[in-house]
Image (cartoon, grey):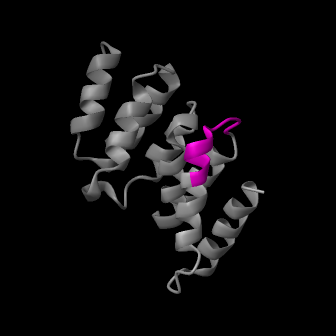
Amino acid sequence: MDSLHELLRKLKTTNSSVERNALAIKAAETGDPEVPKVLIELIDRPELVNERGTLVNCLGSFDCSKNFLWLVKLVCHGNSEVSHEAMGILQTIDHVEELEVKQGYDFLLKTMDDSIDVAWRVDLKADLLSMFD
């Protein structure tokens, strides 16, 4: 790739999950502050719902303290890989604004009674809840 701009353009437009993952890893390695914005945009795309694990993993290379609530939502609603990757990122965050902590806590509490949760998610949510103590 000639430039970060070209790398990010290709990352946003490729239809190949294999290529997207390789480009995401390469982009994350740059450490550029534009990369998390692109990764979040991709992770939020409904058509990529089953192709987000590597993207979330790459996001872990950056400061995600401003995305606390969004990460809590990924833990609560992502597939196993996405949820565990998001939880790993949450565990690295040192400081979060009080309002966002409250919003994350309230969101988590609302999802704690989901009777359709599988065992791994119940355990992950319990671990996340303990982070609020």
Give above or below for 55 relative to 72. above
Give above or below for 25 relative to 16. above
Residue 50 in percent (x, y) is at 37, 61
Q: Quadrant of residue 65?
A: top right
88 displayed left or right of 62: right
Give above or below for 128 relative to 13. below
| Quadrant of the rendering where the N terminus is positioned | top left
Asked if one can make out residue 73 in the rendered structure from this viewpoint, the answer is yes
| Quadrant of the rendering where the C terminus is positioned | bottom right
Pick the front one: 48 or 17: 48
The residue located at (35%, 33%) in the rendering is 38
Where are the magenta residues, as a range? 93-102
114 displayed left or right of 8: right
Indicate whether residue 62 is drawn in magenta: no
Question: Hey, which residue is sitting farthest top in the picture?
Answer: 2
The residue located at (33%, 44%) in the rendering is 42
Residue 129 in percent (x, y) is at 69, 63
Q: How many marks?
A: 0
The residue located at (48%, 29%) in the rendering is 28
Residue 83 in percent (x, y) is at 54, 60
Asked if one can make out residue 79 in the rendered structure from this viewpoint, the answer is no
Indicate whether residue 97 is drawn in magenta: yes
Give above or below for 60 relative to 119. above
Residue 8 in percent (x, y) is at 31, 27
